[in-house]
């Protein structure tokens, strides 16, 4: 599995998007999440189970002036 | 939680004292004028005041200047250039302070539309500094009939300048009795020039503070009166020592009085467009802010914990990117315990984002106002991070006390935080000691010593005199005294071009190293904040990608400063469906809102490319202005190694797994080779790699910006932009073929 175009070493069976976020300590509130190019809304972060060859993108939108 | 509805109002100023102060004024010059009404965002008038001879001139702004420089920062730089020459120093009488709000500023329908830009030749960098600020002065100046004000000369004694936009008067007055510290001076002048309590909201004051006479880090406070709290609020044009120039001119304050703010003072082209976008924006804030950044509750300090999580929060002079004590100053701590909730905390009318938070009736524990209960404006993220973890401090009480005193003394919190972090690291390394600091034990986290140093700066006493120099001059001074290894001092002093870094660690984001290093004014993040795109999202992996980002974002963000806009409503709140757009990071719908606002105000339609072109004209002008003053070349874009990689062994060891892995993945060593390397060898290899990457980045960025590899705008690029002005060509033509 890839996360943001980098190999993701901690994939395991049943891994969800929420699981990746917790593992990576992604705590930023404004995220755009796509799996294989398909947009995933926040209410589905717990539901979407990731496959070993998935291309996951968790893009953080900047803030600040 | 402290709620606005429960908040006692602050006490009124003593009107008898105010009366005595007013009576002590001596009017040096007073002129009357007919305020030019705004038309489509512009008055096309410039106000020039020279405090040497107290002359006041009102001058037409030519159409060509309007077309090429737009307004705001563009006007500020144009007229700063015209006032100065290649030999002008920060304290030369001809050095000007220019202020301009830009054509969109002053509308009240959309968020963040009250910004004023301020420029001068900086005592810290010796080149133009630009700083943007909220508060009411910028819009009031426009409503009073002026797109830009230019202050030159030097008065013999402290003066205030008072513009009354309703009466059409401008006066220059000796003002001997008013206090110098901003929280008091702001109250005094607001009460003095308001006709009654209801009129206080119509007075805007610009002033510095008592440190400005001798401290390079001095800024300008811009006030607005907060009727619910009955207190004068302070916003800051913080960067680059503008307050020092102001004080050097013996200008104690600039006051603008304007009564009658309403929705269409700009006489806009089509108010319906503006109303429509404004409503859309306010709905977005109402429905999305709680789900996104909670700006209305926490202000910009909402991001502290996350930035610590991501190894970006500067800690111990940027050695590290986070602290395990971050929970002590997490957003909910500010929200629940310190910051008043439920106030209309916009720094200009109509901003529903309302991020100008305050800690109210805050009890001071040190300094000349010990025991007073005051209104602290902030802390904003930069202040909290710089005064806090970067110096090893996480106690909100201390951060607020430092924040308050920086503001009232007129000291930039960002420069103060970064500079103090540098001094603390010097102390920890024996470069400073108690003997050299006059007894201040500047170890990490020593709040008492930190506060005492700040008070000494304001009093111009003891080690405070050295602190007042700022990090750049300090490192030169320490080296001159034989205190410490000059190379180490260069590595750890987080300054570039003479300006202290703002508060983001960027070791793991090469693009952000460029975002800081390849700026015109010095390392302030307002040109480009690329850390997430680069370090976390990995969206711009190649040099070409990074160069594109370091072209687009600085130009896009410059546009806000030309128009009088705050950047926060662009990206601190985004539409609910922003994720569906092609480039969510650019927040395309908001960009379209800004194009609409420009059209609605001025009647001129522009597209996204035009927007970038408008900025490029001014951006290149500023670059050439730097060259005119002896900087602005590639060598001036070099950055301290602390911003690029681990300077010390403990830094390397703290992230050893990452750095070792990078030696394999990025530099090309085998795992076996890395295992055999000594720590020193690994650090040297890491440094060689990172410094070389920065040079490659520059090689990619300069051509993208239309510059030679020495950082000089090319003649062809200036022609393409319509900026082949004779005074610019005279400077760049001889440098076209000069190699770095």
Image (cartoon, rainbow, N blue to C red):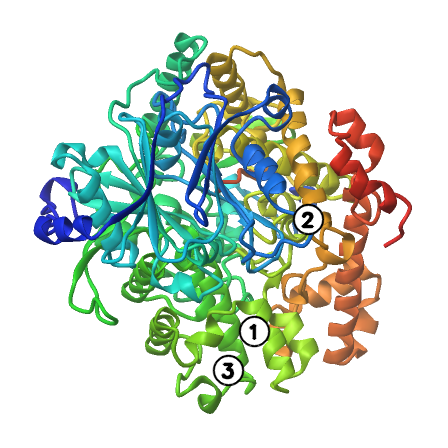
Q: Read off the chain for label 1.
A: B
Q: Is residue B275 above or below residue B135?
A: above
- Could you tell which of marks 2 and 3 lies nearer the N-terminus? 3
Pick the front one: B144 or B484: B144
Q: Is residue B467 above or below residue B275?
A: below
Q: Is residue B373 visible?
A: yes
Which corner quadrant holds the C terminus of chain B?
bottom right
In the drawing, what numbered circle is on residue B474? 1
Pick the front one: B316 or B96: B96
Evaluate whether label 2 is on the same chain as label 3. yes
Pick the front one: B452 or B336: B452
Rendering coords of residue B184 (x, y %):
23, 55
In the drawing, what numbered circle is on residue B501? none
Q: Which residue is mark 3?
A: B427
Q: Mark 2 Cα within 10 Å, few/some/many (few <14, many 20+)?
A: many
Instruction: Identify the residue at horizontal 45%, vertical 58% (top origin).
Output: B248
Q: Read off the chain for label 3.
A: B
Most distant residue in the bottom direction? B435
Rendering coords of residue B428 (x, y %):
51, 82
Number of callouts in the render?
A: 3
Q: Which residue is mark 2?
A: B626
Pick the front one: A5 or B176: B176
Q: Read off the chain for label 2.
A: B
Q: How much space separates mark 1 and mark 3, taking CA atoms?
A: 13 Å
Task: Check if mark 2's residue and mark 3's residue have beta carbons within 8 Å.
Answer: no
Which mark is nearer the camera, 1 or 3? 1
Task: Check if mark 2's residue and mark 1's residue have beta carbons within 8 Å.
Answer: no
Secondary structure of the residue carrying tag 1 is helix
Rendering coords of residue B238 (x, y %):
45, 51
């Amino acid at each position: 599995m890839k996360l943001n175009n980098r190999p993701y070493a901690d994939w395991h069976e049943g891994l969800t998007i929420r699981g990746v976020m917790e593992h990576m300590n992604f705590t930023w509130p404004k995220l755009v999440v796509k799996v294989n190019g398909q947009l995933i809304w926040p209410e589905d972060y717990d539901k979407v189970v990731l496959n070993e060859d998935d291309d996951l993108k968790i893009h953080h939108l900047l803030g600040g002036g | 939680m402290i709620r606005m509805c429960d908040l006692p109002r602050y006490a009124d100023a003593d009107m008898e004292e105010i009366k005595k102060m007013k009576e002590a004024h001596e009017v040096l010059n007073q002129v009357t004028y007919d305020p030019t009404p705004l038309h489509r965002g512009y008055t096309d008038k410039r106000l020039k005041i020279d405090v040497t001879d107290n002359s006041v001139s009102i001058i037409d702004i030519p159409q060509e200047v309007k077309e090429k420089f737009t307004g705001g920062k563009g006007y500020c730089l144009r007229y700063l250039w015209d006032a100065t020459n290649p030999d002008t120093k920060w304290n030369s009488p001809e050095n000007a302070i220019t202020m301009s709000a830009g054509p969109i500023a002053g509308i009240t329908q959309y968020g963040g539309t009250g910004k004023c830009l301020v420029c001068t030749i900086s005592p810290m960098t010796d080149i133009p500094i630009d700083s943007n600020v909220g508060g009411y002065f910028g819009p009031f100046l426009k409503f009073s009939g002026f797109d830009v004000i230019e202050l030159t000369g030097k008065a013999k004694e402290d003066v205030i300048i008072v513009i009354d936009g309703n009466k059409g008067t401008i006066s220059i007055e000796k003002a001997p009795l008013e206090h110098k510290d901003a929280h008091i001076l702001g109250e005094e002048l607001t009460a003095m020039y308001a006709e009654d309590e209801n009129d206080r909201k119509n007075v805007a004051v610009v002033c510095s503070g008592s440190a400005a006479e001798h401290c390079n880090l001095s800024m300008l406070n811009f006030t607005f009166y907060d009727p619910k709290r009955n207190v004068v609020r302070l916003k800051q044009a913080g960067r680059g020592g503008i307050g020092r120039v102001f004080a050097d001119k013996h200008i104690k304050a600039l006051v603008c009085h304007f009564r009658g703010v309403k929705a269409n003072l700009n006489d806009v082209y089509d108010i319906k467009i503006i109303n429509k976008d404004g409503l859309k924006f306010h709905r977005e804030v109402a429905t999305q802010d709680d789900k996104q950044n909670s700006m209305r509750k926490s202000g910009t300090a909402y991001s502290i914990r996350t930035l610590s999580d991501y190894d970006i929060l500067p800690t111990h002079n940027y050695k590290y990117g986070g602290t395990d004590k971050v929970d002590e100053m997490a957003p909910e701590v500010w929200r629940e315990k310190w910051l008043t909730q439920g106030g209309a905390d916009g720094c200009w009318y109509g901003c529903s984002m309302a991020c100008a938070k305050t800690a109210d009736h805050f009890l001071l524990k040190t300094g000349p106002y010990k025991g007073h209960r005051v209104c602290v404006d902030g802390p904003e993220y930069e202040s909290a991070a710089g005064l806090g973890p970067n110096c090893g401090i996480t106690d909100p009480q201390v951060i607020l006390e430092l924040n308050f005193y920086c503001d009232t003394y007129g000291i930039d919190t960002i420069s103060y935080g970064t500079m103090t972090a540098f001094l603390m690291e010097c102390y920890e390394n024996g470069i400073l000691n108690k003997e050299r600091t006059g007894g201040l034990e500047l170890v990490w986290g020593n709040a008492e010593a930190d506060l005492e140093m700040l008070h000494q700066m304001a009093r111009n006493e003891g080690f405070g005199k050295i602190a007042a120099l700022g990090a750049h001059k300090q490192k030169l001074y320490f080296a001159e005294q034989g205190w410490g290894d000059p190379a180490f001092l260069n590595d750890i002093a987080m300054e570039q071009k003479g300006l202290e870094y703002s508060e983001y660690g960027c070791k793991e984001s090469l693009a952000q190293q460029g975002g800081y290093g390849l700026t015109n004014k010095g390392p302030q993040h307002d040109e480009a904040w690329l850390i997430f795109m680069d370090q976390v999202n990995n969206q711009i992996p190649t040099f070409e990608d990074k160069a594109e980002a370091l072209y687009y974002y600085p130009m896009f963000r410059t546009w806000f400063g030309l128009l009088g806009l705050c950047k926060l409503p662009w990206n601190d709140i985004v539409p609910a469906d922003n994720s569906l757009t092609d480039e969510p990071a650019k927040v395309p719908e908001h960009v379209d809102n800004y194009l609409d606002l420009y059209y609605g105000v001025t009647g001129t339609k522009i597209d996204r490319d035009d927007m970038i072109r408008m900025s490029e004209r001014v951006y290149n002008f500023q670059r050439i202005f730097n060259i005119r003053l002896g900087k602005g070349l590639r060598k001036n874009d070099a950055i301290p190694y602390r911003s690029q990689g681990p300077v010390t062994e403990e830094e390397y060891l703290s992230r050893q797994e990452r750095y070792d892995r990078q030696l394999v993945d990025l530099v090309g060593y085998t795992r076996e080779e890395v295992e055999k390397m000594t720590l020193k060898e690994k650090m040297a290899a890491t440094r060689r790699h990172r410094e070389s990457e920065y040079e490659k980045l520059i090689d990619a960025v300069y051509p993208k910006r239309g510059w030679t590899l020495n950082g000089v705008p090319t003649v062809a690029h200036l022609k393409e932009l319509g900026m082949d002005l004779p005074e610019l060509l005279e400077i760049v033509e001889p440098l076209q073929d000069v190699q770095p």
